[in-house]
Image (spheres, rainbow, N blue to C red):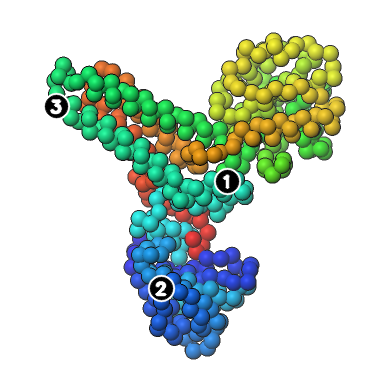
Amino acid sequence: MNENRTIVAISTPIGIGATAIVRISGQKALEITQKITKKINFIPRYATLCCVYNSSEEILDEVIVIYFKAPASYTREDVCEIQCHGGVVSAKIILQTCLERGAILAAPGEFSKRAFLNGRIDFSQINALSKIIQSKSERASKILAKQLKGELGRFVDDLRQNLLRVLAHSEVMIDYSEEDIPSNIISNISLQIKEIQGILKSVYEFSKMRQGIIDGHRLSIIGKPNVGKSSVLNAILLYERAITSPIAGTTRDTIEESVNIEGNVIRIVDTAGIRNSKDEIESLGIKKSIDSMFESDIILAVFDLSRNIDNEDIEIIKLLNTQKNKHCIIAFNKSDLSPAFSHADIQNLIKIPYENIKISTKDLQNCTLLLKKTFVKVLQKDEVGDEILLTSEFQLEAIKKAIESLENAACVFEKLELELFSYNITEAISHISSITQPYEIGEMFDKMFGEFCLGK
Ligand SMILES: Nc1nc2c(ncn2[C@@H]2O[C@H](COP(=O)(O)OP(=O)(O)OP(=O)(O)O)[C@@H](O)[C@H]2O)c(=O)[nH]1
Ligand SMILES: [Mg+2]
């Protein structure tokens, strides 16, 4: 990127609101603003009322200019913000005039990119920014605002400092012969590694469970065929969205609908019944059911109380057991019929935490009420207080890799293979650091800044 270019963009939505803001950043920001306003004196951080003129000296609008002198600005460059009248015309013609005076149209997120490259914000803050812009929930915005203030950056810094200390100890020990290494240093390092591993694991699991807060909740209804999954979907939506029938294998493809339950937007996915099928189309549907379960943060597994537990149900339980760090609800359906088994019969097969409910979709009112109550109960577990929350797939992946590196480190440390130990600690440090200072900058930047709107 050529840092000498002065960029400009409209940073408010076009056509909405009483005022609009045109933002200019770069070496020529002040000079361009002076030219288009025919005014020389702008005191930094003071609002100045003036007019904007085009190159034929015609007045375009009466505006307020705020000049942010470098480095005390969002990008750490000279920045001028021109507040003009809203609507569709004014901001556009002011933008055009700036372009004529030598500014270049900013790419999406280019102001933030400069802020990052000039050390004003770190990568975790950029991530928070991009998510705040897209956020549709108040809860998500509050969490992201904390990240924007650099909370995650400080967490990363602390961990990095601790690991650097461990690394320094290890480097010193390399020069000793094995028997000369003081035993208290060895036990101290083991303890520190364990402690950091513990912190990382709990942050990872806590965040994984709560991914739905930031990205939106997704609930998959799974079960073997004919247990009443589509009937459950219809009960949640209170209308016949999916076809239901006594024929096993009625639902062939996933069906998705969004519902708002006490302010939580949940995408509900009804899936094809999971079983061993030779039918090609049904098998494709079943694959989609399993994929959908993997992508969900809440799983609603439905069982038919009126039929004996069989191998197909056991397969569903086995699948559930692979889904750690997710919310799981087990619904025993068809409770209006005489029961063939009870919760106690399968309880010890289920290895993950879950809520269980007994329902009958034939008693629609109670069924809907109970399902919604359970969803709310499950979502309440998502409350986030002062805990650190990782808010993107990239951050989760970085912490996961750091945990793996620390596991390797702990393993080689037992054998006092110190060079390998140092190598693994260095790896862990670089994975953790990538949350605030990514090393593969190019591609990731384009992807992330591409999600920004113009003028941010
Ligand atoms: N008695 C009784 N029948 C139910 C209940 N819920 C669903 N059914 C019936 O069970 C049959 C299967 O229901 P569906 O909702 O189509 O089941 P499904 O799990 O979506 O089935 P597939 O799409 O084939 O996997 C239908 O005939 C429903 O009317 C219930 O609570 N009680
Ligand atoms: Mg169905």
Residue drawn 51% across the image and 56% down it: 452
The quadrant holding residue 234 is top right
What x and y, as percent, mark residue 15?
63, 69
Residue drawn 34% across the image and 27% down it: 193
Quadrant of the rendered image holding ligand 1: top right
Left or right: where 125 falls relative to 143: left
**Mark 1: C-beta under 8 Å from nearest atom of ligand 2:** no
Secondary structure at badge 3 equals: loop
Residue that badge 3 annotates: 175
Q: Nearer the viewer, residue 120 or 183?
A: 183
**Mark 3: C-beta under 8 Å from nearest atom of ligand 1:** no
Q: For the residue marked with disc 3, what is the amino acid?
A: Asp
* Label 2 vs 3, first from the N-terminus: 2
- Mark 2 or 3: the one toward you: 2
Which numbered circle lies on residue 393?
A: none
Q: Nearer the viewer, residue 369 or 407?
A: 369
* Label 2 vs 1, first from the N-terminus: 2
Q: What whole-number distance in Å separates the C-alpha atoms at marks 3 and 1?
A: 50 Å
What x and y, as percent, mark residue 30?
39, 76
Residue that badge 2 annotates: 44
Residue that badge 1 annotates: 140
Q: Nearer the viewer, residue 307 or 134?
A: 134
Q: Is residue 295 above or below residue 8?
A: above
Secondary structure at badge 1 equals: helix
Residue drawn 60% across the image and 67% down it: 14
Residue 335 visible, this angle: yes
Q: For the residue marked with disc 2, what is the amino acid?
A: Pro
The quadrant holding residue 307 is top right
Q: What whole-number distance in Å separates the C-alpha atoms at marks 2 and 3?
A: 56 Å
